[in-house]
Amino acid sequence: MLNFLNNTASQKRFVSINNRTTASDLPESFWHSIAENSCDINWKNIPLQKSPFQIVTTQGLIQELKPKTIIEFGSFKGASALWLADIQSLSVKNGKVISIDIDFENIDQAVKGDNRIEFLQGDSNKVEAIFPKEKISEIVHPIVLIEDAHINTIGILEYFHNNIFEEGDYFIIEDTNIDYNNACYDVWRKTLDEKTCIAKLENLNNKIVRLTSWLKEKKDLYLVDTKYVDPFGIINASKNWNSVIKKI
């Protein structure tokens, strides 16, 4: 596994959201290429839909933190859960990946039987039903929470803040990159009606707005980890602007 080094040692690694910009050093044309070709990325022949920077940085975080539990909202075909479990198992014994979705009809059969992964069926709008007290008691820390369902993002964060997160835990909010989302809009328009495309775009672009506001309210408790949002010295170089966060 790649050893992701921090090449910005002279800079402060963990910073407040107040010291961040909602922009990337990478040109918009880069994200159009990623959006057009994201389905080309597979894991064990299952569509993964991760950008190259996500693959490097998420792998690096898992290697460094060695999370006992990875919780993923948004399962899609299960490739992400499988990839996370494979990376986790390289440095963590008896780790677990919990993958949550409202239905599992798209999950690849090759993933369903993996005993490292627990698939939980549930509605992101009812996170308390997915993680009642007895389920919370089973969670082993440190954890990484990944929100990739694009539903009730702040509600999920608030519930984890009040009931689950401990010092040293991380969360990643996917698709907070406005340039990438705008590029996806151009791709969606080829197959979807305009109203649907606009609704999808507004929902995604509002994620960074809502996340920024939430982090400002809790600025002393959660910090942006620049090692994983600014890889290779490039500001906001993934689909997740300012969205790899550590609980302090």
Image (cartoon, rainbow, N blue to C red):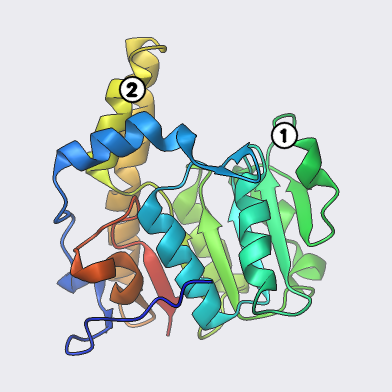
Residue closest to the eye, 39 or 200: 39
- Label 2 Cα crowd, 10 Å radius (few <14 / some 14-19 / many 20+): some
Of mark 2 and mark 1, the one earlier in the sequence is 1
Residue where numbered disc 2 is placed: 187
Gap between marks 2 and 1 measured at Cα: 25 Å
Position in image of residue 229 (x %, y %) = 31, 66
Q: Mark 1: which amino acid?
A: Asp
Tell me the residue at 60%/74% (across/down): 143
Please identify the quarter of the rendering in which residue 132 is found: bottom right
Q: Is residue 27 left or right of residue 241?
A: left
Residue closest to the eye, 227 or 52: 52
Position in image of residue 50 (x %, y %) = 46, 47
Q: Mark 2: which amino acid?
A: Val
Tell me the residue at 39%/81% (across/down): 221
User: Disc 1 on helix, strand or loop?
Assistant: loop
Residue where numbered disc 1 is placed: 103
Q: Nearer the viewer, mark 2 or mark 1?
A: 2
Q: Residue furthest bottom?
A: 10
User: Disc 2 on helix, strand or loop?
Assistant: helix
Q: What is the quadrant of the C terminus in the image?
A: bottom left
Q: Is residue 73 left or right of residue 200?
A: right
